[in-house]
Amino acid sequence: MSERVTVAGLKRPRGIRGELTAVSLTMDPERFQDLTEIVLMPSGRQLTVERVWWHGETPIFKFQGVDSMTDAEPLAGEQVTIDAAERIQLPQGQYFFSDLVGCEIFEDGVSLGVVDSYLETGGPLLLEIGSLMIPFVPEICHTVDVVQKRIDVTLPEGLRDLNG
């Protein structure tokens, strides 16, 4: 199977017609209108999206063949994924957080390590490189090339001491 990207997490059935509430994990909620074929993870179940509508800030998914609360209940907790090639195109200078994982971090040409993961804290995204946490802001991460998997940084004085 090709690389999958999660765009939503299914929460619980809504009503008796097989609909499920979800949490949107995409920066462009309009993209749900174009969904057709998806794969649920971790089960690997392939489904056709019948429709997605919004109840306030909550997307509601309806899949073909899922027509009752009983049909919908086993899908709660699954992740709605699409092929990575189907992701939306981001404007210049914006990145999918998942694309930052695996990038090697360099300061003055010296490797500091590879991004293991990231943390969303309500402030700037934090890149985790071992025990080092680097805020993902332009003042620090001045060159980002997700194709080459490289990020060049200039760490502020004292940042390593905070993490050390």
Image: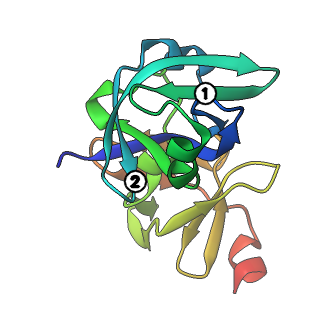
Answer few, some or many: residues within 10 Å of disc 2's Cα (few below 14, many 20 plus, some between 14 and 19): some
Answer few, some or many: residues within 10 Å of disc 1's Cα (few below 14, many 20 plus, some between 14 and 19): some
- Amino acid type, residue under disc 1 in the picture: Arg
| 101 and 153: which is toward the camera | 101
Q: Which residue is farthest left?
A: 1
Q: Quadrant of the C terminus?
A: bottom right
Residue 27 disc label? none
Identify residue for label 1.
17
Say which residue appears at 32% left-offset and 25% top-offset.
Answer: 86
Does 8 appear above or below 110? above
Residue 91 appears in the rendering: no
Residue 157, image quadrant = bottom right
Secondary element at tag 2: strand
- Amino acid type, residue under disc 2 in the picture: Met
Say which residue appears at 81% left-offset and 49% top-offset.
Answer: 123
Say which residue appears at 46% left-offset and 65% top-offset.
Answer: 115
| 33 and 18: which is toward the camera | 18
Image coords of residue 143 (percent x, y): 47, 41
How far separated are the C-alphas under marks 1 and 2? 22 Å
On screen, residue 72 versus residue 66, left or right, reads right
Which numbered mark, 1 or 2, is in the foreground of this view?
A: 1
Does 122 appear above or below 159? above
- Answer yes or no: do the residues labelled 1 and 2 have beta carbons within 8 Å? no
Residue 23, image quadrant = top right
On screen, residue 128 versus residue 159, left or right, reads left
Image coords of residue 28 (percent x, y): 58, 21
Image coords of residue 30 (percent x, y): 58, 14
Of pointers 1 and 2, the one earlier in the residue sequence:
1
On screen, residue 149 versus residue 120, left or right, reads left
Identify residue for label 2.
41
Secondary element at tag 1: loop
On screen, residue 53 versus residue 43, left or right, reads right
